Image (tube, helix red, strand yellow):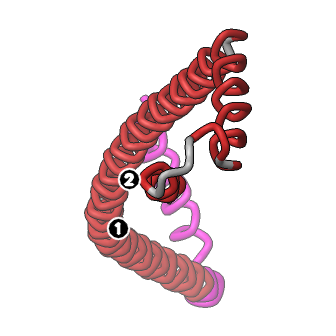
Amino acid sequence: MYTSNFIIAASAGTPFYQDSKFWVAIPVILFLLFVAYKGAFRAMGKALDDRAEKIRAELDEARRLREEAQTLLASYQRKQKEAETQAEAIVKQARVDAENMASQARKDLAESLERRMAQAEAKIANAEIKAMSEVKAKAADLAMNTAEKLLRTELSAADKSKLIADGIKQMGSALG
C-alpha cells in the first residue's frame, strides 16, 4: 500500500525526497539495518530455532512416553490374559478337587457305614454269645441245684460214697 502510494506520488511529478512517506521509510529502513547489524534477526532466528528444537525434543519425549505407555499397556493386557487363564485353571482345578472330595466323601461314608454295620453285627454276635453263655450258666446252675436236691433227698449214703470215689478217679485221670 505504501509502495503503491509512493509510486503514485513519484509519478505525479513531485520529487521523492519531498514526500513524507519517503522520510518515514528511511528511519524504518535504517532501524531494520541497525537491528540486522546488531544480530537481532540472528537472535530471533536462534530463538526460533531453539524453540523449534525444544518443541522437537518435547515431541520426541512425547513419542517415547507414548511408546512406553503402549508397551506397558501391552504388558498389562498380557498379564491380565495370563491372570484370566490362571483363574480359569484354578476354577477348573477347584471343580475337579470338589468332585474328587465329594467322591471320596461318599466312599468314606460308605466305608464308615460298612464298618459301623460290621461293628453292630459284631456287638450283636457278642451279645448273642454272652446271652447264650448266661443261659448255659443259668441252666448249669439250675441243673446243679436240681442234681444237688436229688442227691440229697433220693440217694443213700452208700450211693453217695460211690459217686464221690468215681469223681475222684475221674479227676485224677483228667489231671494226670
Instruction: State the extent of the magenta-drawn residues as a range.
Output: 148-176
Q: Position of residue 85 (x, y in %)?
A: 28, 54
Q: CA distance from mark 1 to mark 2?
A: 26 Å
Q: Position of residue 120 (x, y in %)?
A: 43, 78
- Residue located 62% across and 72% down the image: 157
User: What residue is disc 1 on?
Assistant: 98
Residue 9 seen in the current view: yes
- Residue located 60% across and 15% down the image: 42
The amino acid at mark 1 is: Ala
Q: Is residue 163 above or below residue 134?
A: above
Check residue 80 in the rendering and tell me which mark sits there, or answer none. 2
Check residue 73 in the rendering and tell me which mark sits there, or answer none. none
The amino acid at mark 2 is: Gln
Residue 144 lies in magenta, yes or no?
A: no
| Main secondary-structure element of the magenta-colored stretch | helix
* Label 1 crowd bin: few (<14), some (14–19), many (20+), radius 10 Å: few
Picture quarter containing residue 96? bottom left
* Label 2 crowd bin: few (<14), some (14–19), many (20+), radius 10 Å: few
Q: Secondary structure at mark 2?
A: helix
